Image (spheres, rainbow, N blue to C red):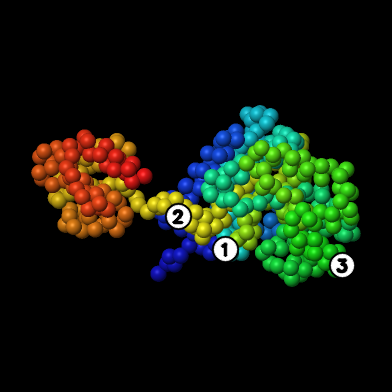
Amino acid sequence: MARSEPARGMRDFLPEDVRRREYVIGIIKRVYERYGFEPLETPAVENLETLLGKYGEEGNQLIFKILKRGEHEASGQADLALRYDLTVPLARVMAHHQSKLPRLFKRYQIQPVWRADRPARGRFREFYQCDVDALGSTSPVVEVEQCAALSEALLELGFNDFTIRLNHRQFLTAVLHSLSIPHALHASALVAIDKLDKIGAEGVKGEFAARGIPGDAADGLLKIFQLRGGAVGAGLVGDADAPAGDPSFQNMIAILDLTKGTPAEGRVTLDPSLARGLSYYTGAIMEINVPDLAGSLGGGGRYDNLVGMFLGQSIPACGFSLGLERILVVMGERGMFPPGLASTPADVMVAVFDAKDAPHALSVAARLRQAGLRVLVYPDADKIGKQIKYADSRGIPFVAILGGDEISAGTVTVKHLAGNTQNTYDQSAAGAAILEVLKRRG
């Protein structure tokens, strides 16, 4: 017998799951559009060469590769891959369609990505990212608008305890230099330290050793990154005044100042302990955290050189992404979804006594749908008690009953299950009557 469970790290989404996902995506999408971001979609599959070399050594190992097909299948070689994120495909799109896109291009993209990662709580091999990116400007206004958009989306979803941690890739470079870590090992060190939340301090120590990072430097770096918040800043640079002239520090201060008066005000905090492992980041990096989740709800940063890998010329770019799966996990555990969101497939079920009356049932259902109701037609002529029991078990509040008398008179009897009441209406008026009761229930 064939196995019925999905592949490890993948999931089936039952109706309740899908409704919750659509609820969250709907709010995020509306907020993104309020900030002037336009929709974009890209293929699930990219050429392998498009993805390789963009995420660093660690990322390359997590790409789901697709073997060559047909006569080349036996070679064991791959030429395609499932997309690893939405940022590299965006850079490819910008290079390929540059003449069709505006100089300042703001896009949002909500699609699944795939990573051959080890599954864990809130971490899957297939998951949705909810990205916003802006290409064409180096202004810190770009980072601030993205922080504001993501803050507004989380606030509308009911989050009020999130923090946006802010750091800068060039500031991290200065830290690594101060610990005498060779420049050739910088990217590798950041990949390792980015795993701190996943594998803990001892695991990161092992990573440092495997990557050839000297013991003293490794200990100093780990000590820094086990701290949290702006209080560690002075320790990184020697004294509190030292970073004042550093461009990367000035950039972060500008971002902090510009958040005033936006939904991100008070949410963004300078945190020199933040590291993000993707190798394409060049400037400010950001991450959203909540207290009861190891890892983040989202993150991003500036990647001014990535488009140039495809286009041959540099285009400034910055992006921020919310992780849908982790948002759903936290919202579910905190009970943040609206009551009744995923409770029922329909507002009313149409029941019939006799199979020959199916045309009348379908006609009444059509009228009720035209009135704006969600309608389920019970397809079998079971006993009416069985039909009502089914509607009640699915949380459907109304049953529209069609017997011979109703059909002859052009009426329909509507039973309100919760109120244990029923009334008979003209078929053309039943929809408005049901809607009125639903409205009063709120």
Q: Which residue is painted at 81% across and 48% down in the image?
A: 170
Nearest the viewer among 152 and 63 is 152
Mark 1: amino acid: Arg
Q: Position of residue 102 (x, y in %)?
A: 65, 29
> Could you tell me which secondary element the residue under label 1 belongs to?
loop
| Residue that label 3 marks | 216
Disc 1 to disc 3: CB gap under 8 Å: no
Mark 2: amino acid: Asp
Q: Find the distance from the CA under tag 2 to the CA under tag 1.
A: 16 Å
Q: Which mark is residue 121?
A: 1
Q: Earlier in the sequence, mark 1 or mark 3?
A: 1
Q: Position of residue 253 (x, y in %)?
A: 78, 43
> Could you tell me which secondary element the residue under label 3 belongs to?
helix
- Is 212 on the left-hand or right-hand side of 374? right
Q: Earlier in the sequence, mark 3 or mark 2?
A: 2
Q: Find the distance from the CA under tag 1 to the CA under tag 3.
A: 33 Å
Q: Dot 1: within a 10 Å radius of its alpha carbon, few (fewer than 14), some, or many (20 or more) residues?
A: few
The answer to whether residue 92 is seen in the rendering is: no
Mark 3: amino acid: Asp
Q: Which residue is painted at 57% across and 44% down in the image?
A: 153
Q: Position of residue 289 (x, y in %)?
A: 64, 54
